Image: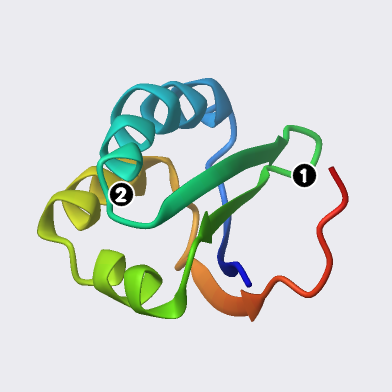
Amino acid sequence: MLYARIFQVLLKAGTAPQAIDLYQNEVGPVLKQQPGYVTSRFLTNTENNKCLAVILWDNEENREAAESSESLQAVFNHLAPCFDGTPTIDYYEVAVQVA
């Protein structure tokens, strides 16, 4: 079973390109180094400035360990100047995956 971390936040107007670049070039490479990382998606809606990141882990223990990873938290902090508010973080078990 896979485990998901869902990260949602409003972006400041006009910062979606910067947030996308930071996620792809800074967050992504650090995620790939984390034990148990499977994949992630970074979604943006420029009409309402919403942002959503879905990160999948191979088990709950690895997801929890990544939460306390200083290197991962540091690169996520690079995204903070793009945020218009406090992110919401939720956790799910992946019940169905269609590939």
Labels 1, 2: front one: 2
Q: CA distance from mark 1 to mark 2?
A: 22 Å
Q: Position of residue 16 (x, y in %)?
A: 57, 29
In this view, the residue farthest toward the right is 98
Q: How is the image coloured?
A: rainbow
Residue displayed at 29% across by 55% down: 35
Query: Mark 1 or mark 2, which has the lower sequence index?
Result: 1
Residue 48, disc: 1
Residue 92, relative to residue 86: is it above or below? below
In this rendering, the answer to whether 79 lies above or below 67 is above
- Between 26 and 60, the residue placed more toward the observer is 60
Q: Which residue is at the front of the view, 63 or 59?
A: 59
Q: Which mark is residue 5?
A: none
Q: In the picture shown, does residue 47 fall above or below 8?
A: above
**Identity of the amino acid at label 1?**
Asn
Foreground residue among 43 and 37: 37
The numbered dot on residue 76 is 2
Q: Quadrant of the C terminus?
A: top right
Question: Can you give x and y, in whole percent of width and height, for residue 58 in the image?
Answer: 49, 63
Q: Which image quadrant is residue 56 in? A: bottom right
